[in-house]
Image (spheres, grey):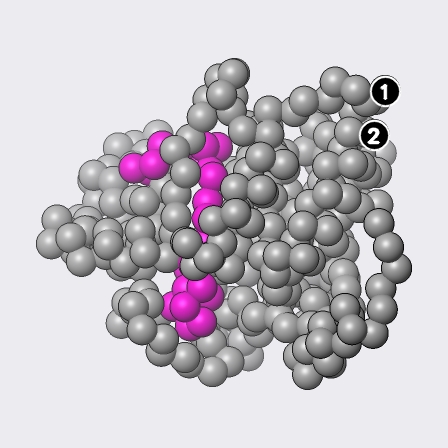
Amino acid sequence: MDVVNEDSIKERVFKYYRDGGGKTFYCGYKSLAKHYSVKVGGCTDWTGYAGSGKSELLLDILKNQSLWYGHKHLIHMPDAGTIEEVIGKLIHKLSGKQFEEFYYNENGDRVVIENRVSESEIERYLPLVLDSFKILDPMTKNNSKALTPKEFWRFAVENKKRLGIFSAVIDSWNYMRHDIEGFAREDKWLEDTLSFRNELAERSGLHFHTIIHPTKARKDTNGQTLPPDMHSLKGGSEWGNNGKSIIVVDRDFESNTSDIIIAKAKPNIVGIRGACSLSYDVKKGNYYEFVNGQKVNAQPLRVEQPNNTLMPNEEF
């Protein structure tokens, strides 16, 4: 342990200045832009009730940034399904065509999908997906070999150069092994774990995304369900105290519209607290917004075409 000196910090200070006080990346939605962007070396915690679409929105943002900036992502998403299911979701988002053969509608009727993605399209998109999304084999929740959060983040940092990754994703926190031995209480373990994560993100330049389920539904005085907040998460106030950016996805299932609530945005260059609304196209697997009454799919502020990056479908 030692204090910084000019020789050790000067280059980092000038890089921080030349990056405008930190470098961030646009997510693709104008209404979200002032509230949230993805910071190099930052952390984002995502929450929402089951089926709210938090994983879908995060995958959309990761896909957008792969398309436009060439970002690659390490993802550990056992809560989102098997490896095949996760790949199917990503091909769905890229092709705009559903992967499954059928689905059940709100009335419980079995609906056969007419414009299903073809095997030739899978051949086209699969290598592109695997180039931009480095997928860890999922571990079951009770598997003794399940990773701890620190083990996962260390793996990401140690393999950053080999994999060429920009970010690393845990979905969800429940599927990680929580070794709290040596800590008097779970909140003390969480404080230590999140502090470790924040420092590692800053030093490595990786962005760490984490999806956390609420412990229980919030209710108002009339018994109506309220969106979860920072205190709804397991560990309570420690997420608010030690988290950087915290996003709540609250979905209206009838309209397929979600309120995206930015409960915390840190540092200031990331955005400001607030909320916006995005809608979800079930058939195409992508979020979109309404701008001046017009439906608008995710679009880049500027298009970059790095080598070996994913190409969007025609209507993207």
* Crowd around label 1: few <14 · some 14–19 · many ≥20 (10 Å): few
x, y percent for residue 19: 66, 79
Kindly report the distance in space between the C-alpha atoms of the residues bearing marks 1 and 2.
7 Å
Magenta span of residues: 63-85
x, y percent for residue 154: 58, 42
Q: Residue 219's quadrant in the figure?
A: top right
Q: Residue at x 62, y 70 (%)?
A: 24
Q: Residue at x 67, y 50 (%)?
A: 200
Q: Residue at x 48, y 32 (%)?
A: 79
Q: Secondary structure at mark 2?
A: helix
x, y percent for residue 151: 58, 35
Label annotation for residue 188: 2
Query: Which residue is the site of mark 1?
Result: 184
Look at the image and say whether residue 133 sits in the magenta stretch: no
Question: In the rendered image, is residue 256 in sight?
Answer: no
Disc 1 and disc 2 in contact, CB within 8 angstroms: yes
Residue 285 as seen in the image, left or right of residue 52 = left
Q: Is residue 80 above or below residue 314?
A: above
Residue 289 as seen in the image, left or right of residue 99 = right
